[in-house]
Amino acid sequence: MSAANRLPSGRRGAVLGALALAGSLLAGAPAAQAAPVSPSAAATPKGDGAKGICKRLPKTEEHLSKALNRLNGNAGVAGSVARLEQRVAHAKAAGRGEVETYLNGKLTARKALVGTLRSRQNDLKSVATWCAANGQGSGK
């Protein structure tokens, strides 16, 4: 038996009426309060971030150098292209075609990453020149 059925008939109507009124008020409240907010107003950048880029320049150069050194390392260096090439060769020699295909995909992506990081490193040299010429940050 529900709680509404246990109440005297006069109170049952009052409870149901109060619930209906509360539901209608709650349902109408968010729609009445919602105001359009311009997403572009809050997301508009104030500048190009040159000061921050120049400030982080030494750390960024260090990260790029470390990554390229690792990628260009010999087969004994974890994460190097040479090590992954060796793994592909081992998978091929063992007749594991699916593993070889998977590793070849990783190898392709890793070789592309080397090119991307070299490009960024070259771009960073021009940024460093600009930062020095404009007296922008030079700390680590």
Image: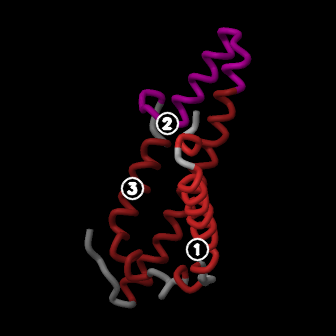
Q: Does residue 28 belong to the magenta stretch?
A: no
Label 2 sits on residue: 80
Q: In the image, residue 6 lies at what x, y percent?
A: 53, 40
Q: Is residue 134 above or below residue 139?
A: below
Q: Nearer the viewer, mark 3 or mark 1?
A: 1
Residue type indicated by callout 1: Ala
Amino acid, disc 3:
His
100 w.r.t. 39: above or below: above
Task: Name the residue beneath numbered marker 3.
Answer: 63
**Predominant SS along the magenta part:** helix
Q: Quadrant of residue 16?
A: bottom right
Q: Is 122 left or right of 31, judged from the image as shown?
A: left
Label 3 CA crowd tier, 10 Å (few <14, some 14–19, many 20+): few
* Residue located farthest toward the top when viewing the structure as drawn: 94
Which tag, 2 or 3, sits closer to the chain's start?
Answer: 3
Q: Position of residue 5 (x, y in %)?
A: 59, 41
Magenta span? 75-101
Which of pointers 1 and 2 indicates the residue nearer the eye? 1
Tell me which numbered mark, 1 or 2, is placed earlier along the sequence: 1
Q: Position of residue 64 (x, y in %)?
A: 43, 56
Gap in Å between the C-alphas at discs 3 and 1? 52 Å
Whether residues under marks 3 and 1 lie with C-beta atoms below 8 angstroms apart, the answer is no
Residue at 49% x, 42% y is: 71
- The quadrant in which residue 50 appears is bottom left
Instruction: Tell me whether the residue at label 1 lies in contact with that at label 2, contact meaning CB atoms closer than 8 angstroms.
Output: no
- Residue 39 shows in the view: no
- 79 part of magenta stretch: yes
Q: Quadrant of residue 88?
A: top right
User: Do we see residue 4 in this rendering?
Assistant: yes
